[in-house]
């Protein structure tokens, strides 16, 4: 018979289960921050590599959105992303690159919608 563990196998929830409303997004943000801290590439080059990886795996719009702030902080431009798309097209295929273009545009649309909603909330609360 296997020995019983002295404690629970998984952490128990906090008393307030709503205290951390975005655990998945928070974890992804932590992973991104750690990868940036422990990488020898300059932030701009790292984000270009990450954009290439997102394109190569067929990432959904939310993945591009999750990397948008880091890309902006790394001074990645639209021209840079186009250059990456052109550079990797022979490797990943034109269909993947075209799909990525659509995902990037949808991510931009999501970002605009979120910003508009935040502005509307600020206007409603008088801030």
Image: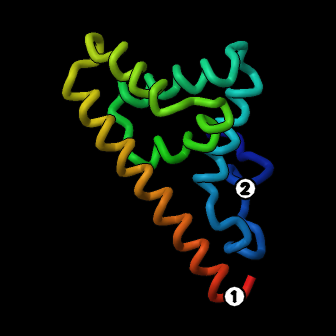
Q: Position of residue 17 (x, y in %)?
A: 69, 73
- Considering every residue shown, the one lying at the far left of the view is 95
Q: Nearer the viewer, residue 85 or 16?
A: 85
Q: Measured from the top left, where is residue 22 in percent x and y?
A: 62, 61
Residue at label 2? 11
Image quadrant where residue 32 sits:
top right
Q: Residue 125, which numbered label?
A: 1
State how many labels appear.
2
Q: Secondary structure at mark 1?
A: helix
Q: How far apart are the alpha carbons under marks 1 and 2? A: 38 Å
Residue nearer the viewer, 116 or 27: 116
Q: Earlier in the sequence, mark 1 or mark 2?
A: 2
> Residue 5: x, y in percent?
74, 46
Dot 2 alpha-carbon crowd within 10 angstroms: few under 14, some 14 to 19, many 20 or more: few
Residue lying at 29% horizontally and 43% vertically, measured from the top left: 102
When the figure is inspected, residue 31 is found, relative to residue 9, above or below; the finding is: above
Left or right: 89 with respect to 79?
left
Name the residue at 52% across, 70% down: 116
Q: Seen in the image, is 104 located left or right of residue 6?
A: left
What is the quadrant of residue 83 in the picture? top left
In the image, residue 79 above or below residue 60: above
Q: Residue at the location (52% across, 26% down)?
A: 50
The quarter of the image holding the C terminus is: bottom right
């Amino acid at each position: 018979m296997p020995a019983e563990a002295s404690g629970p196998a998984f952490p128990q929830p906090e008393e307030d289960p709503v205290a951390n409303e975005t655990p998945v997004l928070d974890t992804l943000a932590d992973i991104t921050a750690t990868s940036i801290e422990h990488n020898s590439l300059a932030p701009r080059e790292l984000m270009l590599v990450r954009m290439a990886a997102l394109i190569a795996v067929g990432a959904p719009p939310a993945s591009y959105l999750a990397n948008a702030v880091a890309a902006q902080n790394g001074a990645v431009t639209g021209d840079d992303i186009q250059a990456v798309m052109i550079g990797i097209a022979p490797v990943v295929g034109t269909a993947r690159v075209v799909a990525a273009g659509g995902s990037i545009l949808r991510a931009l649309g999501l970002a605009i919608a979120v910003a508009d909603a935040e502005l509307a909330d600020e206007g409603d609360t008088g801030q």
